[in-house]
Amino acid sequence: MKRFLRILLYSTLTLVGSGAVLGAAAVAYALLVLAPQLPDAESLRDVRFQQPLRVVSAEGELIAEYGEQRRQPEDIDDIPTDLLLAFIAAEDDRFYEHPGVDYQGLARAVSHVARERSFGPGGSTITMQVARNFFLSREVTILRKVNEILLALQIERTLSKEEILELYLNKIYLGNRAYGVAAAAQVYYGKDLDELDLAQMAMIAGLPKAPSAANPIRNPRLALQRRAYVLGRMLNEGFISPERYQEAMAAPVTAELHAPRSRVDARYAGEMVRRTMTERYGAEEAYTGGYTVYTTIEKDRQEAANRALRSGLRDYDQRHGYRGPEGSMDAQAVGDPAAMNEVLGEHPPFGGLQAAVVLAVEPEAAWVWPRGGRVLQVDFETMEWARAYRGANRRGPAPEEAGDVLEVGDIVRVMPQGEGRAALSAVPDVSGALVAQDPLDGRVRALAGGFDFRLSSFNRAVQARRQTGSVFKPFIYSAALEGGYTPATLVNDAPVVFRDDALESYWRPGNYSGRFYGPTRLREALVFSRNLVSIRVLRDVGIDPTIAHAVRMGFPPESLPRDLSLALGSNSATPLQMSNAFAAFANGGYRVFPNIIERVEDGAGEVVFEPEFPEACELCRDDLPMASVPGDRTGLFDLPPPAERVLPEDNAWLISDMLADVIERGTGRGVRRVLDRGDLAGKTGTTNDLRDAWFVGYNQDLVATAWIGFDDQRSLGRGETGASAALPIWARFMSVALDGVEERPMPRPGGLVTVRIDPESGRATSSENPDAIFETFREETVPVRDDSDRRQRGDEHTERELF
């Protein structure tokens, strides 16, 4: 017996000794081998969270967000106390007591697993999760667990509890691309953290265990169980009262997916910025670097551009008839919300138009059901336009009742009008663009590249190179002014024939009206867009000087054909290029460059990129003597860089004065029905076979271009000119964009004089001439005075004037 006890004692001592030696060896290995290889916890002080690229308006309103991870890092002081306590109760109730590793919690977790055969509270602490999330992989091994413990101890020695908790709550994945609690609040509830109630906070705090499988979107039942667990832990820890516990437990599940809350519908501009950022920084850095790009887009003007373009495209579409429903569903399934929702899921909203199923039709109205919405009444008066589309120039008979247009089961587009009513509409087949710039520095203030970015991401404002038509004529006439012409120069508007050797045929251009007007003053030719005058002017001034003139104003030389067809706008340009070129007329002769990025800030709010905007500004000239600068010169050296002058100031003024007449009494007079201002100038444009319709107009504060056409170059149809199709879009936009903007006529430069002229001869005349009109000239180009009876002057025009 004694021998047995002695053997047992020796064995026990040997085991204890061996265990001690092994334990000491393990500790020594951990401290001497593993610990030195671990990353430095000090680096957590300078951690940079992956944050998406945010594109915002000039006012800071969100346009778009790009990146896989949605995250909004928050300071610990900005996180509600209830949310902090919910996570502590659920994940680590001894967080403020342990040194990074909760030995009691580990023992309790092991005991719980052995007893209940399920996981319970305890195990990894919040600090250990921080160590794992920032430094370690997700593999489950003993070595990784040891590293996790060592890192947690190191982190606790380096950072405060508040710093650790802040890192944890901003880093943790909470499902549906949400990283961190602020992102989760937006993703699941569309709210900021301080807007959450206790039930919602507990729901979020329950997500870390299974963020993908147990979130309230994918599995509401399991998410409710996790919420109940969190609330129970908060009650047991004394963090909430029984009354608050009961109230939160009774709350329904209110979570639903929320996309980033865009405040400004400017996705075409957002995509331009996204491409620029990925080219500048590379895709990974751009999408994760937390950059915020402030654009030059102004919210109110952007919204006005969207409304004007969409309205104009719908108006065109309705003028040409109804192309029928987008689809249909089995009449037997009509009335079943689930079936209708499923069908309508294939017809997302575009441009404010909702898809809806026709439920019932009577002679004076129909009733439709939009996805997830209530029944809407569509009165027949909103369908009267819906004659069947037969082609660009043909429509079917006018409908006499709602049944002539709609049938039960049709899937149609409607425009909600409030009070349970809607108007029949359709997604337009035609395309268009609208872009507006500040002519002083080129900043893009509004840009709509199509009816809806979700319908087509092709950005027609900057990617559609379309024939310019008559909207290019001001540049022909501007070159003519530099070649010695005046607004009163007479040019013969008469038939002309040119031999086209390339086509082995003859070119016989004509005016849109089909008429010829004889000797015509340059001003009248521009006001009424006379084609034959433009051709004769270009032939006289010369193609090469005219192209050089247009290139200085911003047109790419390769886009300008070197033949007389250029006089009719046979070149191609994008709407943005047209606006930018017209800006030189609006700003007094300077070339500016379009830009949509105001500045780029990193995740810390530091400006990392800020483009320069050369400005049309006399005070910005490098050679301006200090003594000549009027007023206070404080901050003079902060002036923007000067834009290049490409046009004499008097040339820009004379062209603008003639283009003001286009709006006052010419092809652009439709503007007057919408805008009652005296500081506007503009030009219509229509191309061959009516494929493109343009209007470009401006004042000193804003230059804007409206374009409408089909992407496949089809004809717009009879009567669809720049004046009828594009001008209304421009006018609607400018009526909002210039609302509250003081009317400012363009200042008249020195060296110009206004004299009376005879409207038929273009020569100076006396005040006694009853038909005399006023015209403005450069001092050196004032025509000679001729007071003889005009009936005796029929042959006095110069050879140059008549060709």
Image (tube, grey):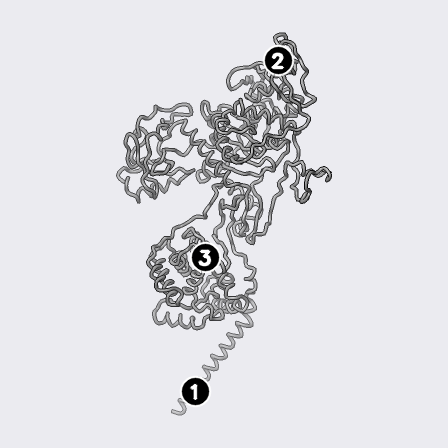
Residue, disc 1 = 9
Mark toward the start of the polypeptide (2 vs 3): 3
Which of the 4 image quarters holds residue 651?
A: top right
SS for dot 1: helix
Evaluate whether residue 505 shows in this view.
no
Q: How many marks?
A: 3
Is 581 left or right of 349, judged from the image as shown? right
Residue with the most extreme top position: 792
Task: Please give the residue where the numbered disc 2 appears in the rendered image.
Answer: 769
Q: Position of residue 8 (x, y in %)?
A: 41, 86
Q: Tell me if residue 136 comes above or below residue 294 in the rendering.
A: below
Three-letter code for the amino acid on which mark 1 is drawn: Leu
Question: In the rendered image, which residue does mark 3 sit on?
Answer: 181
Label 2 secondary element: loop
**Front-most of 101 and 81?**
81
Q: Amino acid at mark 2?
A: Asn
Distance between mark 2 and mark 3 Cα atoms = 82 Å
- Mark 1 and mark 3 lie on one chain; the one further toward the N terminus is 1
Q: CA distance from mark 1 to mark 3?
A: 57 Å
Percent across and percent down for residue 357 are 32, 38
Tell me the distance, in whole angstroms, between the alpha carbons under discs 1 and 2: 137 Å
Q: Earlier in the sequence, mark 1 or mark 2?
A: 1
Residue at the (47%, 30%) spot, across then down: 710
Pair 1/2: label in front: 2
In this view, the mark in front (2 or 3): 2
